[in-house]
Image (cartoon, rainbow, N blue to C red):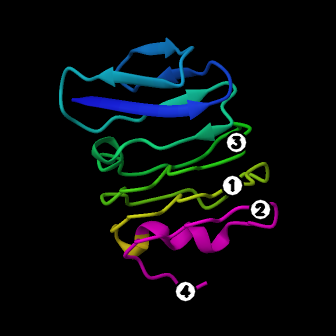
Amino acid sequence: MKFRIKYSGGSPTIDWGDEVVTTVTTTFTSHTYEEHGEYTIKIYDYVTDIKSFDEIYTAMMKSVTTFGDLPLKGLTDTFRYANNLEFVPSDLPSSVTSLIRTFSDTNASNDAFSNIVNWDVSNVTDMSLLFSSARISIDF
């Protein structure tokens, strides 16, 4: 099973959750797991935007529990096509200014997105196509 991440900013260290840890110097990275299963992926160090995973890999994502201390500026396409998503963090980092297509084309359970009603988006300046073609229903 392979998982791919695209990001911008810095050279993060990624703990793939299977005792493999890598430091990445390119904007695209991937990891192949020897066995199918659930893995917790942790990203450390300086990353400013967790960008578009592609549809195949985003569909594998089940939850993002925290954005941690990453100095994120954007979540471009981060949860796009995340149809199996069950949980997103309840706090949006105050450094985030862009949510372009963050939830586009998503058809996950409404419960997965219940936490975003708590997000403080006062610093966000671009929400273009935030929920474009998404099939979710949230009361804000």
* 15 falls in the magenta region: no
Point 65% across, 65% down: residue: 127
Task: Give the vertical position of 95 relative to 128 (above or below).
Answer: above
137 on left or right of 139: left
The answer to whether marks 1 and 2 mark residues whose Cβ atoms lie closer than 8 Å is yes
- Relative to 6, does residue 131 appear above or below in the rendering? below
Q: Position of residue 20 (x, y in %)?
A: 39, 15
Counting residues from the start of the chain, the first of labels 2 and 3 encountered is 3
Q: Residues within 10 Å of mark 4 (few under 14, many from 20)?
A: few
Kindly identify which residue carries mark 2: 125
In the image, residue 10 lies at what x, y percent?
A: 68, 22
* Three-letter code, disc 3: Leu
Residue 81 appears left or right of 88 = left
Residue that carries the numbered disc 1 in the rendered image = 98
Nearest to viewer (mark 2 / mark 4): 2
Q: Amino acid at mark 4?
A: Asp
Residue at the spot 51% in from the left edge and 58% down from the top edge: 88
Q: Judging from the image, what secondary structure is the residue with disc 3 in?
A: loop
Distance (Cα) linking label 1 and label 2? 6 Å
The answer to whether residue 70 is above or below residue 74 is: above
| Disc 2 element | loop
